[in-house]
Amino acid sequence: MPEKVDRRIRKTKSQLRAGLARLMQKKSINEITVKELVEEVDINRSTFYLHYTDIYQMLDSIEQELTEEFTAAIASFPINPLQEDSFPLIAQLFTIIEENQDICRALLGTNGDMAFVTRIEEIIAERVLKQLASVFQKNIRDIAYAYAFCLNGCVGLIKTWLVDNLNDTPQHMAELTNILVVNTVHNFISQNS
Amino acid sequence: MPEKVDRRIRKTKSQLRAGLARLMQKKSINEITVKELVEEVDINRSTFYLHYTDIYQMLDSIEQELTEEFTAAIASFPINPLQEDSFPLIAQLFTIIEENQDICRALLGTNGDMAFVTRIEEIIAERVLKQLASVFQKNIRDIAYAYAFCLNGCVGLIKTWLVDNLNDTPQHMAELTNILVVNTVHNFISQNS
DNA sequence: TTGTTTATTAGACGCCATGTTGATTTTTTC
DNA sequence: GAAAAAATCAACATGGCGTCTAATAAACAA
């Protein structure tokens, strides 16, 4: 509802965000100073402090916006235990990443933020993988490891997709994700049962 | 050979390393100052600068030592395309992680370092996974994605193992790793052929 | 368009961790 | 025990940080 954000604020934040993404390609977040960022995008240092308290709070703020986009997308799809119906949702998630590729590339790259990766993993776990795992209702030791394997595997897919400059469609990536996860869980369980 | 490192240096570096691992559990590397670290381990600030230029260079130095341990272990095992023979090597890698669990926990945790994860991934890729992949010599599109899936999946195993306080043996983890990777690659290829 | 509100700018301020240096003390090593 | 090397202590200039105030510019509402 409150879509009444001043154009100047939108512009300023957008510039800062793009500048941060640019700087994070070159150096670690640790080495990026407020001074450097505002000079990169030619904005007064005071203006930065008008919106953020420091670089890390700014990064956290950006991550939160992204995270909300993900959870909103997830909430918009009906809960359905059937794997087939996960396709559109997963594809939608990849689309969101595509739309925010600059910042995602920064966050998941070499100078990225592990905390963000953790956030992403928690989101995936919350709905997508839990759903798939519910299909295989066996109480098996080591299941947590297979779970972690898939979770991090998915993050690996996203990272590779980003560094490859999004050469594949979100739909294609969603297919791949489904195949790899289902296969892994299925085979792992049948081996240990 | 050059094992003639002064006891004082060993002691100082060891303390600093342990202190850094401790601080990284609480806060991001960005927020950790030299002042804070030396106060944590009760060492003079000048002494820190005697060994490292700053926190990041120190972290890099620690990562390099760890990395060298891994590559040394890998080099000590004979090259063998048979999967079965990978067990001892993989188990050995998990053992090294176990021996350095404090710093590994820090590096792979929420406040960890993505660059270190990248290093680990490159090491795994260089020998372990490449070897397994060579068994399946089909030129298939999307193989890079399956590769990334496995690679990050392995990192996920390690992370989970660490946060679970190493409740399983390195041997057990090596078995799990092998099962998950072989299954994933095998099934993925048979589906796409 | 005009008037009002609000964001941005410019400049200045004390603050504090930084990184360095030189002299001194303590600990190893042989 | 003597020489060598590492750790300590105090002091220094530096530079980014975070804050503030007044002035300027842009956006909005009518």
Image (cartoon, coloured by chain):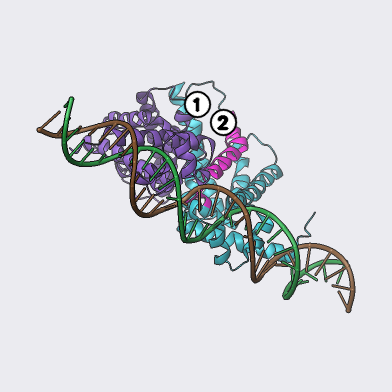
Chain colours: A purple, B cyan, C green, D brown
Task: Specify the label residue B153 is tagged with.
Answer: none
User: Is D9 above or below relative to D20?
Assistant: below
Mark 2 — residue? B133
Residue A63: within the magenta? no
User: Is B163 above or below relative to A187?
Assistant: below
Percent coordinates x, y for residue A66 in the rendering: 33, 38
Q: Main secondary structure of the magenta part?
A: helix
Q: CA distance from mark 1 to mark 2?
A: 10 Å
Q: Give the residues in magenta.
A: B107-134
Percent coordinates x, y for residue D14 in the rendering: 60, 50
Q: Chain of mark 2?
A: B
- Give me the residue at 58% from left, 39% from top: B124
Q: Is residue B15 visible?
A: yes
Q: Is residue D4 left or right of residue B182?
A: right
Mark 1 — residue? B143
Are the residues at dot 1 and dot 2 in contact (C-beta closer than 8 Å)? yes
- How would you rate the neighbour count of disc 1 (Cα within 10 Å): few for under 14, some for 14-19, many for 20 or more? some
- How would you rate the neighbour count of disc 2 (Cα within 10 Å): few for under 14, some for 14-19, many for 20 or more? some
Sooner in the amino-acid sequence: mark 1 or mark 2 = 2
Amino acid, disc 1? Ile
Q: Is residue D21 left or right of residue A113?
A: left
Q: How many numbered discs?
A: 2
Amino acid, disc 2? Ala
User: Is C18 above or below relative to A95?
Assistant: below
Q: Secondary structure at mark 2?
A: helix
**Mark 1 vs mark 2: in front:** 1
In the rendered view of the protein, which quadrant contains the N terminus of chain A? top left
Residue B122: within the magenta? yes
Q: Is residue A96 left or right of residue B172?
A: left
Percent coordinates x, y for residue D22 in the rendering: 33, 47
